[in-house]
Image (tube, coloured by chain):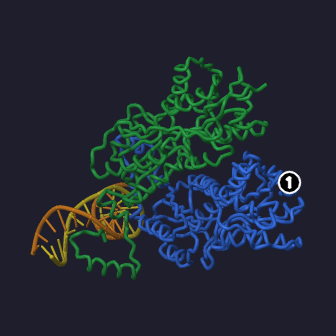
Chain colours: A green, B blue, C yellow, D orange
Amino acid sequence: MRDSALVASTTRERIKTHAREIGYIYNRRAASLRTSRSGIVGVVVHDIMNPFFAEILRSIETELDRSRQTFILSNHYDDLEKQRNFVDTLLQLGADGVIMSPAIGTPPEDIRMAEDNGLPAVLIARDVEGAAVPAFRGDDSYGTALATRHLIELGHTRIAMVGGTDGTSTGRDRYQGYKNAMEAAGLSVDAAWRIPGPRTKQAGFDATERFLSLPGKPTAAVCWNDLSAIGLMNGLFRAGLVAGRDVSVIGYDDLEEAAIATPALTTVWNGQREVGHRAASALVARLNGEEVSAEQELIHPELRIRASTGKPHERN
Amino acid sequence: MRDSALVASTTRERIKTHAREIGYIYNRRAASLRTSRSGIVGVVVHDIMNPFFAEILRSIETELDRSRQTFILSNHYDDLEKQRNFVDTLLQLGADGVIMSPAIGTPPEDIRMAEDNGLPAVLIARDVEGAAVPAFRGDDSYGTALATRHLIELGHTRIAMVGGTDGTSTGRDRYQGYKNAMEAAGLSVDAAWRIPGPRTKQAGFDATERFLSLPGKPTAAVCWNDLSAIGLMNGLFRAGLVAGRDVSVIGYDDLEEAAIATPALTTVWNGQREVGHRAASALVARLNGEEVSAEQELIHPELRIRASTGKPHERN
DNA sequence: CTGAAAGCGCTTACAG
DNA sequence: CTGAAAGCGCTTACAG
């Protein structure tokens, strides 16, 4: 049943047909107990409901399907305890590996513990300093610099940053990229122009009022991601303002949804497909005993200009 | 380690502490091989990336977490072969049960096969005629009738139906509900006013042109779901039309996103949370040997009136 | 090349 | 009550 090359293919097919007829079910638990290979890969992210992760998951799925691995999914909602429980479950099931977007505050020991117990890990979207495992993510600081520079080139000088947190490497990198671009253009960065937090549509929507009452009335917003940007655009619309005309709004990720948003969202492509594909390939390679470099691999982001950004427009 | 009541709790704790110290990992494969209980539940839906299913999955997760079941997720993308592969995998892993939103065209034999091999099933969102298992979903025909009646009460007489297919019970039920409401109000139903297909934002967006060139220029659209409705609203906006003013658009599901859409979407609450919660509870009950009636349980939908519907407005 | 035996790590029924 | 043995269904190394 294992498609061994030692058995003639005609015999194999005959046996398989008969097996199917009598309803034989291969017991993977027993096989796994013996071989200590389970064919299971765990994937844990902050929230699969988030389209950003959903797009990554889809390409992971495609890749793992190809090597006939079953994958188990879990959300950790940035709760370390939930993440640990999931890793424990994987160890108990004898999973072959894990792909994770580590929860905020994940200590490198958590990753090392998994590795030491024979559960190779690969990181996506976020990095954990000190964890000697491969990591795949976008070049966040470069990406937000791209976004900020685009607004500066349009003539904006007062630019806010909406969303994100300093609790993750991604959050720090994106804020840094924004500051870099501002300073490189000789523009002052006002700490009050940062509205930390929003990462969802709802939160972006809720941040509208605060954005509109910011000191110095910024004319543009670099948003944490497409979700918060779309939420903000919806909030602005409720306030009678149209993104791209009255206020410039730029997102991050280039979700499938960005192109059909109202108005179409200018954003930065963050290579979700690439991240998922490469992470899964790297894990599969590790499972096959290949040596995979434990370095971070940064996907190069690209600007996607659409209708939500334009020349600055002063509000009263 | 199984928290048996036969062991004094102090002893248990002492052993557990020691076990943790020496890095003992409980082998669930071995236990499962012996007990033929795995603690694994499979969940298979059309597409987890779809927020409709994501909301259901979230409440399933909450419920299964409570009874300490691990769940394995899979998309079938309405591909019967993919669905069968997943069920096979569950059987091989000795999963305890499966919650499924059956792929279009799933024959009752597929469900029965799983059940006969000791894999109890519970259906969500869609039903399979002839499969004697519990099923949880909204009352679709009633729900679309609610939506259609709302438009009729606003004064609309030419109402289109955008999205859905006759390939599922849900599709047939929703179209039936729409027809029922139209006919009850003495309005004629024009088959040409049905634009079958769209179930995503992109597809709803793409359907805009066809909607705008429909014979008799309908003044309103009952959409398959919130996603296609939001896509259509975005498409209308590109054409210079605003939903709720120029054209009335009503969705279905009441996703979290509906309330913050632009404009806020009138829709029908479809009880995702309820469906997920009840389906998971029913499965857990079955796993505990309780008798669960194999009847369909219909969640009662409710109308949510927001800004995307209004009095009819003739276009030129 | 074929076939019987050992063993993966648990749980459970049973002997002491 | 305690402890040793059997067995879940595979795979693999080994004897014939």
Q: Amino acid at mark 1?
A: Gly
Q: Position of residue C10 (x, y in %)?
A: 38, 57
Disc 1 is placed on an element classified as: loop
Q: Residue at x 45, y 61 (%)?
A: B38
Q: Is residue A120 left or right of residue B46?
A: left
Q: Residue at x 87, y 71 (%)?
A: B187
- Disc 1 chain ID: B
Up-down relation of residue A31 to residue A278 (above or below) = below
Q: Position of residue B310 (x, y in %)?
A: 85, 54
In front of the other: A240 or B29: A240
Name the residue carrying label 1: B310
Count residues near mark 1 (Cα–Cα under 10 Å), then give few for <14, some for 14-19, many for 20+.
Answer: many
Decide if residue A169 is in sight here: no
In front of the other: B269 or A260: A260
Q: Residue at x 44, y 35 (%)?
A: A127
Q: Position of residue B250 (x, y in %)?
A: 77, 57
